Amino acid sequence: MNTAHFLVKSDLKFVDKSTYTWQTPSNIALVKYWGKSNPQIPKNASISFTLNNCHTITTIEFDKKEKGDAVEFDLFFEGKQKDAFKPKIAEFFARIQEYCPYIFEYKMIINSENSFPHSSGIASSASGLSAIARCLMSLENELNSELTEEYINKKASFLARLGSGSASRSIEGPMVVWGNHPEIEGSSDLFGVRFPYKVNAVFENYQDAILLVDKGEKQVSSTIGHNLMHDHPYAENRFSQANENLSKISEILQNGDIKAFVSLVESEALTLHAMMMTSNPYFILMKPNTLEIINRIWEYRNENDSNICFTLDAGANVHVLYPEVEKEAVNQFIENELSKYCQKNHYICDTVGFGAKQL
């Protein structure tokens, strides 16, 4: 399958007005992708847990207008007009115009809100852009009723990817692979696919508590971080390592080796941050409290023979992962011991979810 598959190939039956609302989740990568080429092609494959409680709700009102040369839209975030976000969305529309020519036929009013702090390392671009993509595909489906659900999901992921690479993994769930990988059936650089193999019961309904160490703006944007991999001295070895780790985690998820899961997921998180610390310029994205949390998790795991582990995105916040069977004990540990390392003791209890849903 190539990009031509997502071009609009039939006549569209335009409507005067339509409104769609979608709730799309954030996701947390277990095997990370870090480094890409244009247009938004990953240097290595990745796999993520789709989250449930951390999501974006986006409503787009489409009003038919005279077709023009520019895409017209107003953007509101959490009830307030947000012109600061418009350049990124405008760039997204420029990237997808070939695949969604109908965006020139409508004035769009976009209203969006998050269930979590924006720009704090909980993949707000992933949930936000996947929500816009899903609304666009609802319009396309109304204009062309011949589309299949499989095609709609793939194209939504394809479009979302052109705005934010990780957004390709926020359309479906509970686990999504993005990036072509020889051992993952159906995988592609162009869109995310649900992990295609039966997952061991130990990984069902997995828990993720997000500890909000730093709710402020990220020190460095993901776009800048990815670009730092272009001349990185360890880049090629990292890309190979990630693809090998995806092979390993595929087996782990199927055979239920939770100890191996813990080791691989934590190694992936630390490797991501190692890439940032050895880039030029270099960044240390973890905060002192990030390290305090990691050390406490290691102590708790050893003392209680627990399968708790952590992972990190490109920021200071810590995702605490644990099987459902340990939910009560770990939640107590987080409340009693780890919450003090969070800003205002704030953390979010989340669980693996099943992807986007229309509201």
Image (tube, helix red, strand yellow):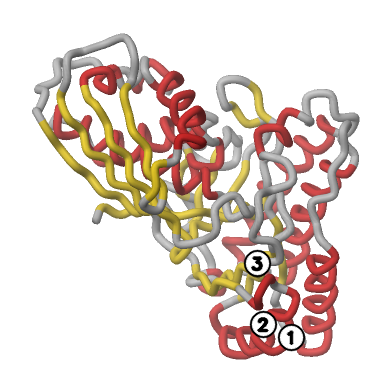
Q: Residue furthest top?
A: 69
Q: Which mark is residue 337?
A: 1
CA separation in Å, label 1 and label 3? 14 Å
Q: Residue at x 55, y 58 (%)?
A: 117
Describe the element under mark 1 as helix, strand or loop. Answer: helix
**Quadrant position of the C terminus in the picture:** bottom left
Describe the element under mark 3 as helix, strand or loop. Answer: loop
Q: Counting residues from the N terminus, which is met first, the one under dot 3 or under dot 2?
A: 3
Q: Which residue is mark 2?
A: 334
Q: Is residue 62 above or below residue 130?
A: above
Choose top left, top right, bottom left or bottom right for residue 317: bottom right
Determine crowd level at label 1: few under 14, some 14-19, many 20+ residues with C-alpha closer than 10 A: some
Amino acid type, mark 3: Leu
Q: Residue at x 77, y 47 (%)?
A: 272
* Residue 267 point in image, percent of width and height: 80, 57
Choose top left, top right, bottom left or bottom right for residue 238: top right
Q: Can you see residue 2?
A: no
Q: Counting residues from the N terminus, which is met first, the one under dot 1 or under dot 3?
A: 3
Determine crowd level at label 3: few under 14, some 14-19, many 20+ residues with C-alpha closer than 10 A: many
Q: Which residue is mark 3?
A: 212
- Nearest to the observer: residue 208 or residue 203: 208
* Residue 149 point in image, percent of width and height: 25, 41
Choose top left, top right, bottom left or bottom right for residue 63: top left
Amino acid type, mark 1: Glu
Q: Is residue 151 above or below residue 20?
A: above
* Residue 210 point in image, percent of width and height: 61, 68
Q: Are marks 1 and 2 in contact (CB under 8 Å)?
A: yes
